[in-house]
Amino acid sequence: MSLDLPAVIADITASMASMEDRGQVATYIPELATIDPAQFGIAIVTADGRILTGGDADTGFSIQSVSKVFALTLALGKVGDQLWDRVGREPSGNAFNSITQLEHEQGIPRNPFINAGAIVVADVNLGGHEPRVAIGEMLRFVRYLAGDDSITINDAVAASETATGFRNMALANYMRAFNNVRHPAELVLGSYFHQCAIEMSCRQLALAGRYLMLDGRHPGGGRVISPRRARRINALMLTCGHYDASGDFAFRVGIPGKSGVGGGILAIVPGRAAIAVWSPGLNASGNSCLGTLALEELARRTGWSVFSPPDEGD
Amino acid sequence: MSLDLPAVIADITASMASMEDRGQVATYIPELATIDPAQFGIAIVTADGRILTGGDADTGFSIQSVSKVFALTLALGKVGDQLWDRVGREPSGNAFNSITQLEHEQGIPRNPFINAGAIVVADVNLGGHEPRVAIGEMLRFVRYLAGDDSITINDAVAASETATGFRNMALANYMRAFNNVRHPAELVLGSYFHQCAIEMSCRQLALAGRYLMLDGRHPGGGRVISPRRARRINALMLTCGHYDASGDFAFRVGIPGKSGVGGGILAIVPGRAAIAVWSPGLNASGNSCLGTLALEELARRTGWSVFSPPDEGD
Amino acid sequence: MSLDLPAVIADITASMASMEDRGQVATYIPELATIDPAQFGIAIVTADGRILTGGDADTGFSIQSVSKVFALTLALGKVGDQLWDRVGREPSGNAFNSITQLEHEQGIPRNPFINAGAIVVADVNLGGHEPRVAIGEMLRFVRYLAGDDSITINDAVAASETATGFRNMALANYMRAFNNVRHPAELVLGSYFHQCAIEMSCRQLALAGRYLMLDGRHPGGGRVISPRRARRINALMLTCGHYDASGDFAFRVGIPGKSGVGGGILAIVPGRAAIAVWSPGLNASGNSCLGTLALEELARRTGWSVFSPPDEGD
Amino acid sequence: MSLDLPAVIADITASMASMEDRGQVATYIPELATIDPAQFGIAIVTADGRILTGGDADTGFSIQSVSKVFALTLALGKVGDQLWDRVGREPSGNAFNSITQLEHEQGIPRNPFINAGAIVVADVNLGGHEPRVAIGEMLRFVRYLAGDDSITINDAVAASETATGFRNMALANYMRAFNNVRHPAELVLGSYFHQCAIEMSCRQLALAGRYLMLDGRHPGGGRVISPRRARRINALMLTCGHYDASGDFAFRVGIPGKSGVGGGILAIVPGRAAIAVWSPGLNASGNSCLGTLALEELARRTGWSVFSPPDEGD
């Protein structure tokens, strides 16, 4: 193996530090608008268990929509493929918070990674319980995946979203009219906003993503989900993980990934690596500006695109 | 290697023969409406040069939209990444012949695999020449890729599309109003319809697809395109290759593929295999019904999903 | 004058009694779903003060969206033409409860008679007060217009809408994200649902509509609104008063009118008559089936279409 | 009668001459782009036969979409109400040349005054003949209505549109795919572009519109269409005559009118007046800027809004 991964990470971290255009920090969640954009972190966990990091890899950030991957995993465990009666699996061709598509398709969101779809998933995970029960279960699940009980939820961020989340309230009520949200909207969103407000560092996030690299196995033993389901979640991350820039991410990076408006991206190279990058400035599509560039450079240096012959990589 | 590929192909071929629901043969191109739906073929060319076939693998069929892969390859060779100023790289969220998106996005098609995008690609490939020049170049290119000079164009199919292709004429004229089609619509479509009317067997189509499995190299020596470009075409096939069922195909099969309304699908497993399947009955999304099922079964048996760890496969 | 209006009304009432297809009673508001569809009423108040009635003209019904006319009149009195910064004046080209248009036009509803527009009007009328204040003001205004203090609000209907009004909750929250709804959605809708739940008979409704026939004057003396504003409200009723069937209503009837899902329609013949019809069965566009037919017949018999020479009428 | 119409016209003409913002001359038809925007004309024909004019009332201009009124009248004469199986009667909620709506509604245009609807009307009027036959019939019809055989078609304008009318070609082909255009698109548009290129002065246009003021009668005797049909055409002009500004025109002017991109507007006050105004500069909605202002002022001074009591007018 000729790939010097530590050197690659050092190069990328240095390269990102010199970038002038870092995008814009999300402002629609007031609590996030104050984050310093001059931060960048990266962490890679390899299939053989090495952990490599660069930059601000141990600084916590709001994982926001990256949480949709873990919430989907939980929901599939609860209701299995019946979930797909309520959520589609197609890229949306619209912005992350669009409501137009719901009207054309009778309240069925196109995929579980746009906000509408994630709200249905949160409705499934609520399962008749109080929001705090679902929130607790989600937090325990993420801690178990990462093997780290220090992961917490930032209540101020959750409260900030609750106070301003009118579009999500619109989405939830709209789907409730089609009976595709089954709990009161404020309960579903109470749970959803707390899930989005989970705080993790790049290191923690990469560790939490290992099961998707390992075909569903937990590195500590046992199985989180079946290989088929792990593969399918990876497929959804590739086709739908970056909102209306998913095609471009697949084109330029070629690795399944899920971004969040907090600036984090979780990316999975099946059989090889779970990667987390973070930089709070966003590009026009709402994905981390430096995070996307770092993953593009990483894919170029490692040959980890799923669209290359495997032996081109490490 | 424990994968017995001949047995897998034999099983799949037998399984497909017993299927009762074979979908509907496309009727909007009159010349295609008469094809017998009780046909199924499969051909796999592996990276080490083996050719394995099953069923009607040597029967010729109209490759239709599968030709968009070869046309895109040619156009990128002509104008390079400037092509992306005129065509996007995002899944469309609409039917293959939708015109709505063009109005919202100022005449720029979402990707080169929906009809509007393929018409722009045909406009690029026309390059100021007569349609017969562009058609000749396309045919020579496909013969070179497949290493088979017996491949021809079915003029009756091309004429049939010309007589009924009103939607494509609408798309071409609409984009011409935005100067994103630059030759007269009837010339662009003259070339486009002939490209779609190329006839190939599964064997020929799989052979023609080898360069995408081989990171851009021609198996006979030399390079068709750069590795980066090959990877990117594979990425586009995965995110956009099956119209508004691309997400579902990625979810269920997990292999880059491009379907055609003639019932053919070209699928690429990077570094491992180029696959062609064919069965003329289509499902509701306009993709080959049995072809899709056969590829799903093949991916399951071989572990060839790009979303699985590579060592799970052969 | 050769027009025998009592005979016309008698004929129409008899004709409606014999109709077999009476449409479907609205079911999405549970409290309305139980109304007997075999009812029809009509009341006409002429410019010279005659009141003519037919059928169930004194049975109360839920005026629902007809209330949007009175709410608009109130809101224009409060904020004047500034209202038009927040609501458009164009027919919508969509169903009454569509949310798609709001996304394309940045939270500005197309007109004050679709639900989204009426919710903005309710937000204006709320004006920082408690819903009960705005509700009280609206009820007093309608009583003043009709000269009838016995008009009341049906709290059961309002409660029924509150419990099931998820689409309206979605609309209100969606516009709040654009700051085009400025009070909490539940307060605005609390007021809006009570406004819709006003109960009136045809007689009362026709009386309440007199100011629009009289260029803004109250028949009891004084002025409700300016002539210019009365004319403009009539124009809005003609172009937008029947949701996505407004064009058809103008084409067939030719009289400004506003329909409600409770089966009522208020129609205004400027300078001549204020008309109320009611029959609870709705056609596919959500407008009263018999009510529309009755007005079409009335316009035919009287020559009251605003698109005919005035001397063709009475 | 206290209305001094000559003084009103003189005032309006003077007022328009002093306007600084005259809008933009349409540039998408090259032949129209060279017109001097500093022109304004008005002509009013009253029910009692007076003709009053102001400004450039005898300068010819391209009537463009105003011709849709005459073409609709002809088509209704040919196929009667069957026309409404192929064209709707609702305002479109979209720009005049939008194609989106056609996709959602299966090739049926929303009304006969948007381009798609007018193309269907032209297809009906073609009726299996050569374009020159239909063009000749249209020209004879307009001459008959105006009582003026000097009216001609500007072939240079027609040729200019033919060379650049890609959007119209797209619309025609798109509807042909739904069999709602039944002749080859180039023949239908050949006829349509010539109809649009009819040149008339304000005087001629007002004269041609008399039948719509007179409930369908030709002032020279005989009947052009039935009263019911005249009324309905007036209704369509009010709800759909100004593209996506029809609601605003009804709101501000209150008189049925049809505008054209050449800067002309034909407006009808039933029983009272046929009015033509012309000024080539267009506002953002594609309607004559000064023409609209002049009609608004005229309606204010005369009380001719169809939404006012008739006795408020002359």
Image (spheres, coloured by chain):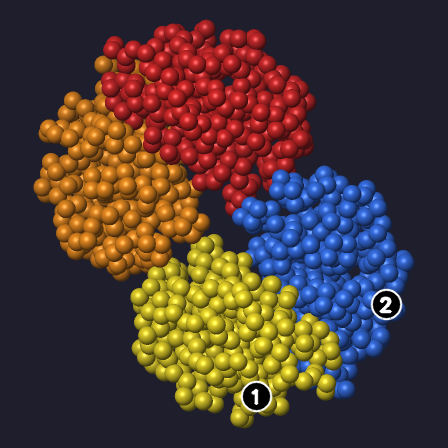
Chain colours: A blue, B yellow, C red, D orange
A117, D8: nearer the viewer: A117
- Residue D215 placement: quadrant: top left
Q: Is residue D101 left or right of residue A225?
A: left
Please name the residue that numbered disc 2 is placed on: A222
Q: Position of residue C167 (x, y in %)?
A: 60, 37
Q: Residues within 10 Å of mark 1 (few under 14, many from 20)?
A: some
Q: How many marks?
A: 2
Disc 1 and disc 2 on one polypeptide chain: no
Relative side of D176 to D276, left or right: right
Q: Name the residue: 84% across, 75% down.
A: A50
Of all chains, the one bearing label 1 is B
Left or right for D256, reference C113: left
Q: Residue at x 41, y 13 (%)?
A: C54
Can residue B56 be seen at all in this image of the molecule?
yes
Identify residue for label 1.
Answer: B51
What residue is drawn where x is 12% and y is 29%? D222
Q: Quadrant of the C terminus of chain D?
A: top left
Identify which residue, B63 or D245, lies in the foreground: B63
Q: Quadrant of residue B98?
A: bottom left
